[in-house]
């Protein structure tokens, strides 16, 4: 029956895996207790045999791109990293065992302020500091047993990467999507850098240093992300996006309703003013004027009273007044008034006591009734002149990418006294970071345009969110020296099938990455506009924190005496002061962090992997507590014993009685294992593949362990189904605990007397990681659930090989031949139906019916009341 399985999967296997022969077990035939020392021995032995799987760029049909957000190389993994990379690795290994050509790359988000600050404190170069940290973290990830494709490793601070970040900037610049403007910026006085609005918290403090943010006027580089606002908003309805859940709403809220248009118009103070209006045709009004709130930054200019704005649409100069009384749109400090169009604006003009400016234009040229045509003209001209005119919400601003810091991607621009801001020619990239102690002269160069000497390099570097906005594309072609990446590779392997990361990046990083992919899609470099099909937003790792009541000082767990855990009562050992206990995100400042290395050393890395995956879904916050460890520790011991018992049962020299394997009693016992295997394979597979509830997959596997442990010795010895179920158990464990499962498997295959030796489903001569994922048997009965208005009406049992073939209309036929459905549907109107098939797992037919009309309902309820009264 296994031969029936999808032939493409088999083909995929042959292409993907350089066949590895069975690796010798490290414990051999010794019977040993599963101690931490033994686990370390097992992990050390298997670690070097485990990770030689490579992504095959030729196998496109079977591709599966699993991406986890790349870490900032702070020097040490924290438990949040352990969680995200374990989830990613378990999913990647699962798909690989299902025959997919999995791409699971890793790299380093290595530019940024913390490295610069840390390196400064230590008197070393940021590059050196970063390199050391990367080496350390790479070692930890390897110890964790993650099957990353290291051949595609990249680091955003290496010239071979930032060269292309610069190239991307030039592409944007060429298309008018990168521009410079003077802007009032958020200035962090501690880190001495500009912060984006979103890096300032609700109290007006820096997200990083915590300092009170000041406002400062500076010339800055922007990326015109608002040009894609409408497209990015509409993209959220893209049917390829799955499991985005509340992230869709966060993104939607961030972008806002695109109910107007933004323009960037030059002012007499030689900068650009953002003007947002729902009525762009108003720019055709020769009498248009602008009202700016008094708090607007342009008010601070010395010549603010004479300020005006160029209006290329009416070929006029628009006067600017400062006043707080106009009908400002939400989140805007600028109001475009058009007296020809609006009576209120004419009144406003009068109330401001201003006289109409005299223009050459005649008023009658503008007919407000003709607004549609006027709007079209304005938008077309705006696009031609590159002054905006994009549909956008009133609140969404362009992306300010300038950072006045050293450790970032240098912006590839040269400022020439004659030519202005000139892009560095592509062939001169990368513009490298100068040595930090280099003097000002090192910034001088010849102008690429006019050749004059004395031009000056731009000293701003880019926001690190630019680096991380496109790394998923570079991974595919990480070492290409000639182009940003091979568009054909992107075409074959994008979009990312599953993107895993923390919710803290749900707005900014995902927004910028989506923008960049939409942009690259428009350039023909990415096949889809949306870069990430499916999201898995993992929750935080929390731990108990202890704070002294009153002072609020955090103390370590070891300093605390717990009086009553249930009532949350604790005292500081030294002073007997009361201590407040709570669950908070692990962090150094709260003294509640747990070092992954300590956990690895004490319990083993596979145990750490299982603990972090067990009990709660990946999307939930997880409270890290040693109270949850015994469940996993005992399970591992039980699995270990199961193999010992299996071996003992098979090796028993003189069975106490002759067993009749054809007897009804024997077959019934063995059939239990057939059912258990199928039931738990179905459950675990669903959670690995569809729901991503890896904690539930673990409890399904534990269910199978219980069935195996309950099996009588003679069935263990002679039951074919027992042997298959035990094999499935070890194989399903492998993505989560690859070292441990490898050792269990080598013990399993070394046991003599194989009963399924000829069966194609088990590759007896290969390691567990080269096994095919167990499948539900063709004859096993699966569920076709019929639900009406989300309530289960009935469950029909269908053999697996039949269920896989059922389509929507078959399911409807079955439903209409089922009494419980037809009797329920009598005198109800079907509104809609849908059908979901999870091949080899289950099928669900949803029927939605109209609710009873109100009149009927109230008649019914008054009847009921009548009945109650007669009682
Ligand atoms: Zn020049």
Image (cartoon, rainbow, N blue to C red):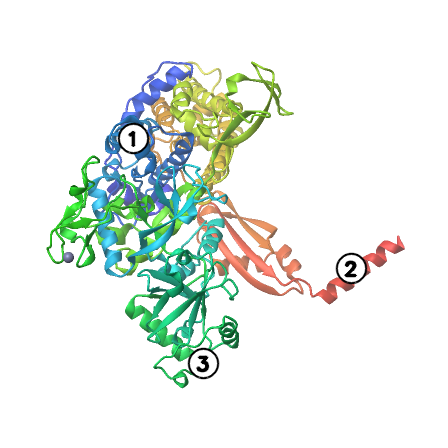
Q: Give 700 or 240, whichever is nearer the viewer.
A: 240
Judge: label 1 CB < 8 Å from ligand 1. no
What's the CA distance linking mark 3 and mark 1? 62 Å
Give the percent coordinates (x, y) of residue 615: 51, 32
Residue 438 against residue 333 in the figure, above or below = above
Q: How crowded is mark 3: few (under 14 residues within 10 Å), some or many (20 or more)?
A: some
Give the residue at x 28% y 44%.
Answer: 12
Residue 516 against residue 46 in the figure, above or below = below
What's the CA distance linking mark 2 and mark 3? 58 Å
Q: Which of marks 2 and 3 is in front?
A: 3
Whether residue 527 can be seen here? no
Q: Which of marks 3 and 1 is nearer the N terminus?
A: 1
Q: Do the residues labelled 2 and 3 touch (CB within 8 Å)?
A: no
Judge: label 2 CB < 8 Å from ligand 1. no
Give the percent coordinates (x, y) of residue 398: 37, 56
Q: Mark 1 points at which residue?
A: 120
Q: Earlier in the sequence, mark 2 or mark 3?
A: 3
Task: Say the numbered circle drawn on residue 861.
Answer: 2
Give the residue at x 33% y 37%.
Answer: 113
Q: Is residue 431 left or right of residue 337?
A: left
């Amino acid at each position: 029956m296994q031969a029936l399985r999808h032939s493409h999967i088999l083909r995929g296997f042959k292409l993907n895996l350089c066949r590895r022969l069975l690796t010798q077990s490290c414990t051999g035939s010794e019977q040993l207790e599963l101690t931490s020392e033994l686990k370390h021995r097992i992990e050390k032995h298997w670690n070097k045999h485990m990770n030689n799987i490579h992504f095959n760029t030729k196998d496109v049909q079977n591709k599966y791109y699993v991406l986890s957000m790349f870490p900032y190389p702070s020097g040490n993994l924290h438990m949040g990293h352990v969680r995200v990379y374990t989830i990613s690795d378990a999913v990647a290994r699962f798909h690989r065992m299902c025959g997919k050509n999995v791409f699971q790359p890793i790299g380093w988000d290595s530019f940024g302020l913390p490295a610069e600050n840390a390196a400064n404190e230590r008197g070393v170069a940021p590059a050196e500091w970063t390199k050391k940290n990367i080496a350390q973290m790479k070692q930890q990830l390897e110890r964790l047993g993650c099957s990353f494709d290291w051949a595609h490793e990249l680091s955003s601070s290496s010239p071979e990467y930032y060269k292309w970040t610069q190239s991307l900037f030039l592409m944007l610049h060429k298309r008018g999507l990168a521009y410079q403007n003077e802007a009032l910026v958020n200035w962090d006085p501690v880190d001495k850098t500009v912060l984006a609005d979103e890096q300032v918290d609700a109290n007006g403090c820096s997200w990083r240093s915590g300092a009170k943010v000041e406002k400062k006027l500076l010339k800055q580089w922007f990326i015109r992300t608002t040009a894609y606002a409408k497209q990015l908003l509409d993209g959220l309805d893209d049917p390829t996006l799955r499991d985005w859940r509340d992230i869709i709403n966060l993104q939607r809220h961030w972008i806002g309703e695109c109910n107007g248009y933004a323009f960037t118009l030059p002012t007499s103070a030689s900068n650009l003013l953002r003007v947002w209006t729902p009525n762009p045709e108003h720019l055709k009004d020769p009498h248009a004027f602008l009202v700016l709130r008094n708090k607007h930054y342009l008010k601070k200019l010395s010549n603010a009273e004479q300020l005006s704005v160029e209006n290329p649409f009416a070929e006029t100069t628009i006067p600017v007044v400062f006043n707080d009384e106009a009908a400002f749109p939400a989140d805007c400090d600028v109001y475009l008034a058009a007296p020809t169009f609006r009576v209120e604006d004419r009144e406003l003009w009068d109330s401001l006591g201003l006289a109409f400016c005299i223009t050459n234009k005649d008023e009658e040229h503008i007919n407000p009734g003709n607004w549609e045509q006027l709007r079209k003209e304005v938008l077309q001209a705006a696009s031609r002149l590159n002054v905006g005119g994009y549909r956008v919400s009133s609140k969404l601003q362009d992306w300010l990418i300038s950072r006045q810091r050293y450790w970032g991607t240098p912006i590839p621009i040269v400022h020439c006294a004659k030519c202005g801001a000139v892009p560095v020619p592509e062939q001169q990239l990368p513009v490298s970071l100068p040595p930090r102690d280099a003097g000002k002269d090192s910034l001088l160069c010849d102008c690429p345009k006019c050749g004059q000497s004395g031009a000056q390099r731009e000293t701003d570097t880019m926001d690190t969110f630019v680096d991380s906005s496109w790394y998923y594309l570079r991974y595919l072609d990480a070492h290409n020296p000639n182009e940003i990446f091979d568009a054909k590779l992107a075409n074959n392997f994008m979009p990312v099938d599953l993107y895993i990361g923390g919710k803290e990046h749900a707005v900014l990083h995902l927004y910028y990455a989506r923008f960049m992919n939409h942009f690259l899609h428009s350039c023909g470099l990415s096949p889809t506009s949306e870069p990430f099909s499916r999201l898995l937003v993992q929750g935080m790792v929390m731990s108990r924190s202890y704070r002294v009541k009153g002072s609020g000082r955090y103390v370590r767990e070891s300093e605390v005496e717990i009086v009553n855990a249930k009532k949350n009562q604790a005292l500081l050992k030294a002073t007997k002061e009361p201590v407040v206990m709570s669950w908070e995100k692990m962090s150094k400042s709260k003294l509640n962090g747990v070092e992954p290395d300590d956990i690895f050393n004490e319990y083993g890395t596979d145990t750490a992997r299982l603990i972090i995956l067990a009990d709660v879904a990946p999307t939930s916050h997880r409270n890290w507590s040693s109270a949850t460890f015994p469940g996993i520790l005992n399970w591992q011991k039980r699995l270990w014993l199961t193999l010992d018992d299996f071996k003992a049962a098979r090796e028993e020299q003189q069975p106490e009685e002759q067993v009749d394997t054809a007897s009804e009693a024997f077959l019934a016992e063995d059939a239990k294992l057939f059912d258990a295997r199928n039931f738990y394979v179905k459950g675990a597979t669903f959670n690995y593949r569809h729901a991503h509830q890896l904690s539930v997959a673990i409890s399904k596997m534990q269910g199978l362990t219980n069935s195996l442990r309950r099996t009588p010795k003679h069935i263990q010895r002679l039951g074919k189904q027992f042997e298959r179920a035990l094999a499935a158990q070890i194989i399903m464990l492998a993505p989560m605990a690859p070292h441990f499962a490898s050792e269990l498997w080598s013990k399993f295959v070394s046991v003599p007397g194989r009963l399924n030796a000829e069966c194609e489903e088990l590759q007896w001569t290969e390691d567990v990681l080269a096994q095919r994922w167990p499948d539900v048997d063709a004859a096993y009965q699966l569920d076709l659930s019929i639900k009406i208005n989300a309530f289960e009406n009935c469950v029909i049992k269908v053999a697996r090989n039949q269920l896989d073939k059922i389509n929507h209309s078959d399911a409807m036929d079955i439903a209409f031949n089922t009494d419980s459905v037809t009797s329920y549907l009598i005198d109800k109107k079907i509104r809609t139906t849908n059908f979901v098939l999870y091949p080899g797992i289950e099928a669900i037919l949803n029927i939605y019916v109209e609710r009873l009309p109100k009149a009927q309902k109230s008649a019914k309820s008054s009847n009921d009341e009548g009945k109650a009264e007669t009682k």
